[in-house]
Amino acid sequence: MTATTTAAAPARPLANSYTAGKLPRWTPWVMLVGSWAVFAAIFAILAASKATEGFNIVGAVFFGTVLFDVAIYTTSLLVEGPRKAMDRLITSLVATAFIVALLPLISLGWTVVVQGLARFDIDFFSQSMRNVIGAGGGALHAIVGTLEITLMAALISVPIGLLTSIYLVEYGRGMLARGITFFVDVMTGIPSIVAGLFAFALFSLFFGPGIRNGFMGAIALSVLMIPVVVRSSEEILRIVPNELREASLALGVPKWLTVLKVVLPTSLAGLVTGVMLAIARVIGETAPLLIVAGFTTSMNYDLFNDRMMTLPVFVYTQYTQAAGLHAQDSIDRAWTGALALIIIVMLLNLIGRIIAKAFAPKYGR
């Protein structure tokens, strides 16, 4: 009897989706940017051939994002398998929803930047509109007025709003606290024109109906700003852990000193953010300032004397008065004024972030 031996065939590796290939971590970002670049080139060609009116940034971002969804799913399916491909597809769809929500902001920012660059020059930021009929002129008087009125409104609103929120969080109980909360909520929904009429009626009682000045504009803006500061500061102060307050009180520190030395420094970053949101809320108001601060083409540095121009009113008047031979000049100044207003808000937020980071408590390991 002879024994026959056969060589054992090597075992074939099992196909397992968990051990499939893996795309590099940078792949989604490269594919997203590449998809945007593809449709940006397509829309740029269409704009150059006069097939569309200018470059469509919204279309480029939207269709580029859709192309990214298809590309990332297909690539992951070929390399990583169906399980990981489906995970990447769902993740990309969530990102797509976020980008779609940002499309109005992208369109607004792109339009303001493109249109506003027409007069973004030295003259615009160094001249007023005094004795200017056609081309030329600038918005220096409006920029100064906006900064002065907004700063005065902040000086009025921030102490009142912050002290109110401290009372509601640290001391307020019973009917008084509930009443303050109710009226703050009511003030949050007040139309801006009502705030302007309130300031106008208040000053008319004492100085007559013909008065207009920048301080009246600051009062009108503070009516709109105070409830925003109160609500945002109240939420931030409630986030501070009670253990910090209890530890301070256990050491014999008075309540007011605990609030001053423990609660406020801990929540400083959030409080500054709330104040910046309140400033951004009121700095672009037009209706109340048009009523109480008035309109002028000349420089005015005095908040308490005569009319004072602001950037929102400047943009409004330049755009609405665009007619005749110099219509395009007025429209260009309006767009540049809107761009300057956005830049001011961004700079104020940046300054607020720097201040919050500089004065926030430092925690050691």
Image (tube, rainbow, N blue to C red):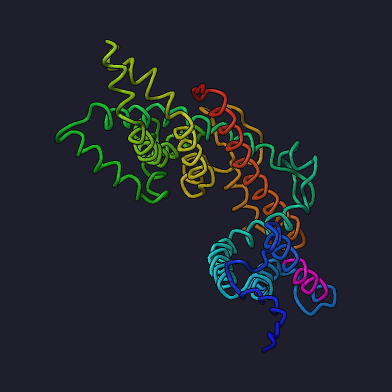
Q: Position of residue 149 (x, y in %)?
A: 53, 34
Q: Residue 74: horizontal and vertical position, in percent?
A: 66, 76
| First to last magenta residue range | 36-45
Residue at the left extreme, as displayed: 175
Q: Main secondary structure of the magenta part?
A: helix
* Res 25 → quadrant: bottom right
Name the residue rendered at 61%, 36% in the picture. Answer: 350
- Residue sitting at x 40%, y 37%: 229
Is residue 42 magenta-colored?
yes
Question: In the rendering, at what x and y percent does residue 304 appear?
Answer: 51, 27
Does any portion of residue 19 appear in the rendered image? yes
Q: Residue furthest top?
A: 252
The answer to whether residue 98 is above or below residue 219 is below
Snapshot quadrant of residue 3: bottom right
User: What is the residue that sits farthest to the front in this orientation?
Assistant: 1
- The quarter of the image holding the N terminus is bottom right
155 or 125: nearer the viewer: 155
Lateral position of residue 84 relative to residue 272, left or right: right
Examine the structure image and report whether residue 351 is included in the region drawn in magenta: no
| Residue 335 occupies quadrant | bottom right
> Which residue sits at x=70%, y=76%?
10
Please say whether residue 69 is visible from this viewpoint: no
Along the line of sight, the residue nearer the viewer: 130 or 245 = 245
